[in-house]
Amino acid sequence: MLRLGFIIGLMAIIGVLVSGLAAFKVYEQELSLDRIALARAVDTHAALVQERLSERELLTRVAVGLFRTPSINKANALQPLRSSIYAFKTDFVVAGWIARVPVSQLGQAQAELKAAGYPNPTVRNFNDTPLTSATLRDPESVLMDVEPKNDETKLFVGRVFDDQPIIGPVLTRAAEEGKPISSDPLELVRNGGPMGIVLAAAVKGDGSDTVAGFLTISYRLAPLMLANDELSLFSVALRDPRDASNNLSADTNGNIVSVPLQLDAENPPLLRVVSFGSRDWTLIYYAKLHVGAHAQEVAAIVLAIGAALTTILCGLFGYVSYNNIRLSREIETRIGFERRLTAVIDELNHRVKNILAVIQSIVTRTMRHGADIDVARELLIGRIHAMSHVVSLLSESQWQGVKLKGLFESRAIPHGERIVLNGPDITISARAAQSLSLLFFELASHADEGLSLVGKHPHVVVEWSVAGERPDTIFHFRWEEFNTSAATRRPDSDFGIVLLDRVAPEALGGTAKRYFTDVSYVYELTAPMETVIDENELDRTNRLSAPVKKR
């Protein structure tokens, strides 16, 4: 089981490592795909923004080409272009005609504005303050017409934009370069108005290289950036050309607000550059979701699937292996049982043969030629009964030996209750029990039959002891019959003499002697304790009787 657990653990570790490696590879692949998808979406968006900007720049160029410079500075100069401007369907805020009016013609221009009905026809500074001789320049860039005309836009007509901080430089560049120029972001129409960009293009006089004025078109910044697409993967911002540390970003209402530049090392923004009005504009794209979040989710799913498959495979392998081991153990156990059964049968045959040999010897010795039939029958029955009793005791203990005192029970020997026992309660081997049971029966049968000196049955005292230290311990046995003598005690039979003097001592590997004292008959037996216990036989019996261990 320990080896199986080690194998399953190793499989689990390998499975987890493979799953982790697969999850890492999937993470890298998904991260790369997500970045590619984001980059493609950003490229598409930037291309659309560039297309929109190009359309609006084209509108300005077309309008300049269609524009006819009036011979005098009129207040309705945009009238011929109105249909063309709206035909493009662009989301411009205000279109304007800024004429370059010589100082000598300022009065005429002012009269035109008054005739057109503008609320303040006076030519004045961009901040609505009067012109002074110190600030006059020749010519002045005066806003003469606007489209659409409404209460807010009419207020700007008549203003001079040469000194306006944002529009003034744009007009100067447009006059010098001869192409549309875009301004920095500024508030359109009014203070707090929508953030936008003014595109200005110079218009030259007919047949002349002199700039007669400027056609300006302003656009809101948010529509130009295509901001606030809720379904897009990113949010877009414009780097503020006035301050590179700030971004111009559209809020939820489409209003452009200035926010600090956001830097994220793990999820850096993407930059794209578009061209509009002869200058480059940097669009900054921020991913709405962490680019690696989706890759992490997919990698986590792959890792979970790998771990689940690893668990299933380890479980199946463990289940199959456990069943195989269990089946193998059952087979080994069955083989062990069969081997033990064979050994038990062999042991039984051996012991049965020994018992039959002993019985055969008992019968042969008892029924010797010339013996009294009745006496021989009684002795034969008693001796076989003694053998049967010891076999019963051995069967009860599963042939693991018997208690020495059990051999003196009254059912084993005649009148066992008259015998006084004195000795340790030791367990002797089966072989020793068989020999001693016959020995005790032979001694008890003669003691019971003999006549005492006073006409009573003899009093028998049996003592045994174990002396010495292992493995040299010695077993001492002493049988003493009191109130008997050589004259009164019946002589031992030939079988008894052989049993007492030779068979029993030889079976135990010891020596024996018998003799009479003045008042008793004594039989002594001395043998090594290792033959009385016979540990080899006991070990063999224990192995046969012990349950087969399952591996």
Image (tube, rainbow, N blue to C red):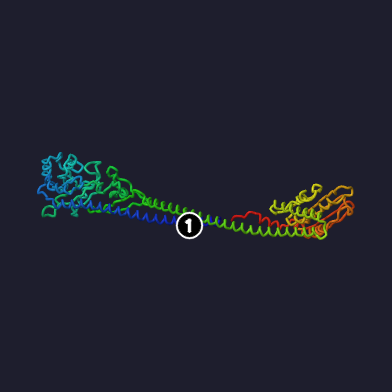
Left or right: residue 518 versus residue 67 is right
Front residue of 28 and 48: 28
Front residue of 471 and 251: 471
**Residue 517 point in image, percent of width and height:** 88, 53
Q: How many marks?
A: 1
Q: Residue furthest left?
A: 71
Which residue is pictured at 18% across the width and 49% down the height? 88
**Residue 394 point in image, percent of width and height:** 71, 53
Under tag 1, what secondary structure? helix
**Residue 462 point in image, percent of width and height:** 81, 51
Where, quadrant-wise, is the C terminus in this rendering?
A: bottom right
Residue beneath disc 1: 14
Which residue is pictured at 80% across the width and 47% down the height? 417
Amino acid at dot 1: Ile
Where, quadrant-wise, is the N terminus in this rendering?
A: bottom right
Locate residue 109: give its quadrant.
top left
Q: Circle 1: is it few (<14), some (14-19), or many (20+) Cα within 10 Å? A: few
**Residue 52 point in image, percent of width and height:** 23, 51
Left or right: residue 535 versus residue 183 is right
- Residue 12 visible at all: no
- Residue 435 visible at all: yes
Front residue of 262 and 328: 328
Left or right: residue 516 versus residue 303 is right
Front residue of 350 and 226: 350
